[in-house]
Amino acid sequence: MKSVPERFDNPLVPYRAEEITIPADVTPERVPTHIVDYSEAEQTDEQLFQEISKANVICIVYSVNNQKSIEKVTSHWIPLITENTDKDSRVPLILVGNKSDLVEHSSMETILPIMNQYSEIETCVECSAKNLKNISELFYYAQKAVLHPTGPLYCPEKKDMKPVCAKALTRIFKVSDLDNDGILNDNELNFFQRTCFNAPLEPQALEDVKNVVRRNLIDGVCDNGLTLKGFLFLHTLFIQRGRHETTWTVLRRFGYDDDLELNQDYLFPLLKVPPNCTTELNHNASLFLQSIFDKHDKDRDSALSPVELGYLFEVFPYTPWGPDVYNTVCTNDQGWITYQGYLSQWTLTTYLDVHRCLEYLGYLGYSIIAEQESQAAGIIVTRDKKIDLQKKQTQRSVFRCNVFGDISSGKSGFLQAFLGKNLTRQKTIKEEHRSYYAISTTFVYGQEKFLLLHEVFPDFDYLTDADLLCDIVCLVYDGNNPYSFEYCANVFKQYFMDSKTPCMMIAAKSDLPEVKQIYGCSPLEFCRRHKMPPPQSFTCNTAAAPSREIYAKLTTMAMHPHVSQADMKTSTFWLRASAGAAVFALLGFALYRVMLKTR
């Protein structure tokens, strides 16, 4: 490392200075700076192009007392740099007017039009290498141009913030608006200040900030809180006054990179999920998601209307849930997602695609609002299922049931019935909005659990390993179709007869006359031979919501795979489970009403 001289003694200046590194501990931004000089007299264009490709910032030096040197900035240097850099990632430029000790006037009048013409020019500094005037400032601005560039934030021609910056700051405002009233009150502003700068604002400083906005913007402050317009104005002011490091600090704290895209490390923090383990939301993440629901449920009806859901997703770059979600989770009579349905959908995403869940939590600002290191802190990775079997108990809250059955056996009806939809409501579902998943809660021995039903495509050629991995298998046949049971028997014998996964037969469409199945034995005899519970009758052709008893049974079997099939046949086993489900369903509903009043 070459030391940086602080004296200018030699009148014979070399064409090119040797490479120098300024150590981090002597710079304001605490980052090392590697300085590489270039001279046309000693180096080739190829060497210059190589250095340009490696540079984070380029200083174009001209002589303030030489008009041709100034003209060469636009006629030669800027076009050359532009031609050798990617259009989408232009290197910031600093114009450096050297030899200011030789003139009495400033070159700024000539340089300002050039700065306005080229947006990649961050700033201009006049200095003197001889008497060291503004030399330290030059390298400070060079560092600042890399760490806190103006280009992505501000358009000098329009004298306004760039749309991509306004979009990022709008998301930050909405995430920080904890009560969703459209303004940042003093508590929210102080939380924002602590989050970004590790210190709250003093009451007078807070009032001074709002007064600045009031003086310049009619609707920047409302009900003594900062509106979105006021928030954006404040950051525009920071940038215009050369304090864009303040805006960059905010952007980076909320996960944005130099291109104002959410950083991949922010959206997808490291989370290892070993084989045979599943992923669930923990208590803190569930509370956070509840707070998000509450702040968007404006009418307090414990459901999110399409408009309310649209506002919730404004902090996302795209709409994460498609129309099939309304046939995946519970909805109210208007077809809107209920609070239970909302949490169920989050639980489904966490279970099926935990990295997608981390991404979604990132858009909502979970790690910032919940003050966690990352979204991964909101995820539980369950222990290996083999350990659960060995210990004969589980701490898991989500259980997967794969539903098999031939075409028209009643699988889809079975899934939709779990969401409280009878046959009449099911007939209104459009084919393009159909879902192959259904998730809701059941109560087993007083514990609330999530049961995830997955309808498996009936073609054997399309079966995947994922179709076979589950906590319980549900084999559905149409009791009114004599050829329906054979498919279930074949699936069981080919894939599950020798597995430890519990299985249950469902005789669907029990409202229709039962017919004899064309198979070597009856469904009841088949179950007896293979030590399965007897076939369970089921129908969704009811006046009210279909019975949920069968789903509690499935969850119970999934929770207790170690229990022998003989024990499951006893009425005592099912009575304990069903009684617990009924009692705690009533308690859960009562508690839900209390929570609703509190909210």
Image (cartoon, rainbow, N blue to C red):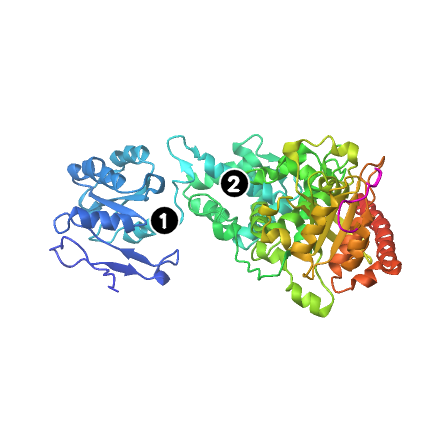
Q: Along the horizontal axis of the image, is 554 left or right of 586?
A: left
Quadrant position of the C terminus in the picture: top right
Say if 414 sits above or below 394 in the image.
above
In the rendered structure, does residue 518 fall within the stretch colored magenta?
A: yes
Q: Amino acid at mark 2?
A: Leu
Secondary element at tag 2: helix
Image location of residue 153, percent across then percent down = 43, 40
Callout 1: 10 Å neighbours few (<14), some, many (20+)? some
Q: Main secondary structure of the magenta part?
A: loop
Secondary element at tag 1: helix
Which numbered disc flags the more N-terminal residue, 1 or 2? 1
Point out which mark residue 169 bears.
Answer: 2
In this rendering, does residue 286 appear at all?
yes
* The residue stretch that appears in magenta: 510-521
In this rendering, does residue 281 appear at all?
no
Say if 189 sits above or below 163 in the image.
below
Give the quadrant of residue 560.
bottom right
Q: Nearer the viewer, residue 188 or 67?
A: 188
Callout 2: 10 Å neighbours few (<14), some, many (20+)? many
In the rendered structure, does residue 74 fall within the stretch colored magenta?
A: no
Q: Residue at x 79, y 42 (%)?
A: 479
Say if 307 sits above or below 371 in the image.
above
Q: Amino acid at mark 1?
A: Val
The residue beneath circle 1 is 146
Image location of residue 252, percent across then percent down = 48, 49
Give the quadrant of residue 117.
top left
Image location of residue 515, percent across then percent down = 82, 41
